[in-house]
Amino acid sequence: MNANKTSNKSTLSQYYEIDNSIYQRFDAKNHMIYRPFWDKTLPTYRQMFFTNIEKHIKSKKGGYTRFDFAFVKAGWTVYEKFPFAFAWEGEKIQTINEYGTNWTKSKYIIENPNEFTQKIKKVAKFYGASLVGITDIDEKWIYNTGLKVKALSKIEMERNGINSTKKDDTFSKQPISLPKGINKAIVMAIEMNSDGIATAPAQPSSASSAIAYSKMAFSIACVGEFIRNLGYRAIQCGNDTALSIPLAIDAGLGALGRSGLLITPEYGPRVRICKVFTDLPLKSDKPNSKFIKKINKICRDCYKCADACENGAITKDREPSFKGESSSNNPGIKKYYVNVEKCFEFWVKNSGDCGNCIAVCLFSKINKSITPSEFWNKI
Ligand code: SF4
Ligand code: SF4
């Protein structure tokens, strides 16, 4: 999406309709995953996935046993225990002894930007990305403010790329401004395991999400370091710093569906998204306009994800709108707004991140749902 595709009035572009008189850059504080930490109006105030885990384990229900929850928690390991994954820069001190040379001394000479861009995509896939696209960074998608919250656990802060050492009992805002010259995003999608997702909303589905987050952390860290080894800059991001879905659409990876998720031609919404911002002189991809049109058309008359949602979080309105459902939505873009408060209520009840809407989407290529026991018995 380019800034010149929008105006102060509602403008039909090939990819989006944006009302710039409404649209504002999003404050990360309003992300649904953070609001339970500070928003007392929510029924889920101070609740998280772990709130009901003990109750589930005692119930001995298939897909909610200690074995299943242990499987999910372990899936988060790299994401949670490897804060460098979300670094904005490499180690400050690099010695000549570090792998034989001073990597930051000079810039690698790029003779053919087209070929070089293809190689960067190859590198990203080699390090774990299922899909890779490149886009110019549109400032609209960068969060207006980041977040620094003592109330969040260290793990939550790391999980969301928050790097705060100051003691502070209140939420405070940190304006996000990318360093000058950082103008490209390498956007990567990581496929989630289809058998796990097919058990949604049981815990193997959450485990598919958890391990994809850890793969994200692994991949962005390796891609970021590779770029720095070429003498360029890299900012490694998971869900933090900028909205991943519009960046992915701009990078040609897919389209926005009724479920509020990125739909890719290859895996449907069965992906997690991460990105690395850089000053490498890369060639940008174009949005996949044919696929965007196809999804816009199909989602108008398909209600599978809305029907599958156990908490009515996905709208059944035929037409998209500019109006969000809560402060966790970002109004001003014509789309189907998901009631993420209701979605999160179900996540807390379920002790995991559900996935019903992903499992049923025809683009996820899951023929039928399976039980947790079928999942565990499938070789
Ligand atoms: S993740 Fe589950 S609760 Fe949330 S919107 Fe999708 S189906 Fe509904
Ligand atoms: S399930 Fe149907 S309506 Fe929902 S995102 Fe997929 S194609 Fe669109």
Image (cartoon, rainbow, N blue to C red):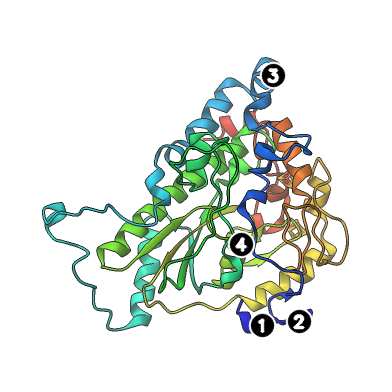
User: Can you tell which of label 4 and label 2 is closer to the viewer?
Assistant: 2
Q: Is mark 2 within 8 Å of ligand 2?
A: no
x and y percent of residue 290 in the render? 66, 78
Horizontally, residue 67 falls left or right of residue 128, namely right
User: Quick one: 250 or 329, which is closer to the camera?
Assistant: 329
Label 2, on which residue? 11
Disc 4 residue type? Ile
Q: Which disc number belongs to residue 281?
A: none
User: Quick one: 127 or 178, which is closer to the camera?
Assistant: 178
Element under disc 1: helix
x and y percent of residue 177 in the render? 49, 64
Is residue 199 in view?
Answer: no
Label 4, on which residue? 245
Mark 3 burial class by Cα count in 10 Å: few <14, some 14-19, many 20+: few
Element under disc 3: helix
Horizontally, residue 204 falls left or right of residue 110, namely right
Q: Earlier in the sequence, mark 3 or mark 1?
A: 1
x and y percent of residue 332 in the render? 76, 68
